[in-house]
Image (cartoon, coloured by chain):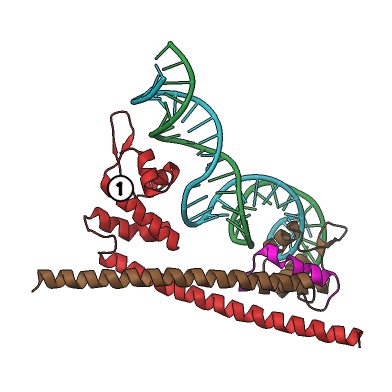
Chain colours: A red, B brown, C cyan, D green
Amino acid sequence: MRIGELAQRSGTTTRALRYYESQGLLRSRRTSNGYREYDETAVRVVREIRTLVTIGFRLEDTRPFVECLFAGHESGDACPDSVATYRRKLAEIDACIDELRAARATISDAMAQAVARRETTCRACCP
Amino acid sequence: MRIGELAQRSGTTTRALRYYESQGLLRSRRTSNGYREYDETAVRVVREIRTLVTIGFRLEDTRPFVECLFAGHESGDACPDSVATYRRKLAEIDACIDELRAARATISDAMAQAVARRETTCRACCP
DNA sequence: CGTTGCGTTGACGTCGGCGGCAAGGTTTAG
DNA sequence: CTAAACCTTGCCGCCGACGTCAACGCAACG
């Protein structure tokens, strides 16, 4: 199939597909007129990319999964590198959640104090 | 004081300070030779900005706090707009944490399945 | 008087993941 | 035959918060 059909079937744009190819995440044959030609594997590859990116993976982090599919595996996460990437991503997410929780606590405390100050100020002005 | 001293005292760079000014978050008088001249308020303003940005505020979100300080208040969060910004930020953080937790769960499940598949595959090849 | 170290403005680079447009070639439907 | 709908490459734009020059002015010290 050509790039437009692949874009439709995998739920993205031709622009994104060309970008993935420029990043070495997608491969294509060329027909005699220079058009890109894809097989069914490409659909699975792009869907894998989209799924991971939607979850929050950076494009670069999808590479092991893509390689795994190109290596002929059933699933993109059938290879050790993919599982290792899962693990790193989980660690990243945990760290991120921790940071956000800390920030949340800081803001929450600051807000409580600000509100308390406003109330005492109000009481001071309006006895 | 001049820009270099302000940068040191507030723990940032002159470049950042000029950027803040370009964004209307910082104001300065000019000496006869064109140098920026700051007073003590500037130190507090910049520290407020840095504190908030470090927590995860976007620069634009620090504006109410800065305005509050310039309006002569003791604390940057003494004004209603600042408190409202606190609230919005808390909501944002909560939403972000929820997203991350969902992604975490998805990845965690996928990883468990991948690992399970690898084990059964291994058993099949190595009886 | 030269050097070093401040300061100034302006403009381009960075990172990620594309969007959008230009200027062409191809194919297909009517 | 022509118009629409594909395809190609290439390049600029975007977001945020600056970093990093360049090319200059000013000041202070020995």
Above or below B97: residue B15: above
**Which image quarter is the N terminus of chain B in?**
bottom right
Above or below D8: residue A16: below
Rendering coords of residue B32 (x, y %) = 88, 58
Residue B71 is covered by the magenta coloring: yes
Inspect the image, locate mark 1, and give the three-letter code of the amino acid beneath it: Ala
Relative placement, left or right, of B56 versus A23 is right
Residue at figure coordinates x 67%, y 74% from the top left: B51
The residue labelled by disc 1 is A42
Residue at figure coordinates x 28%, y 56% from the top left: A67
Relative placement, left or right, of A86 versus A116 is left
Relative depth, front residue between B25 and A65: A65
What chain is tagged by disc 1?
Answer: A
Q: Secondary structure at mark 1?
A: helix
**Which image quarter is the C terminus of chain B in?**
bottom left
Residue B21 can be seen, yes or no = yes
Relative placement, left or right, of C16 versus A118 is left
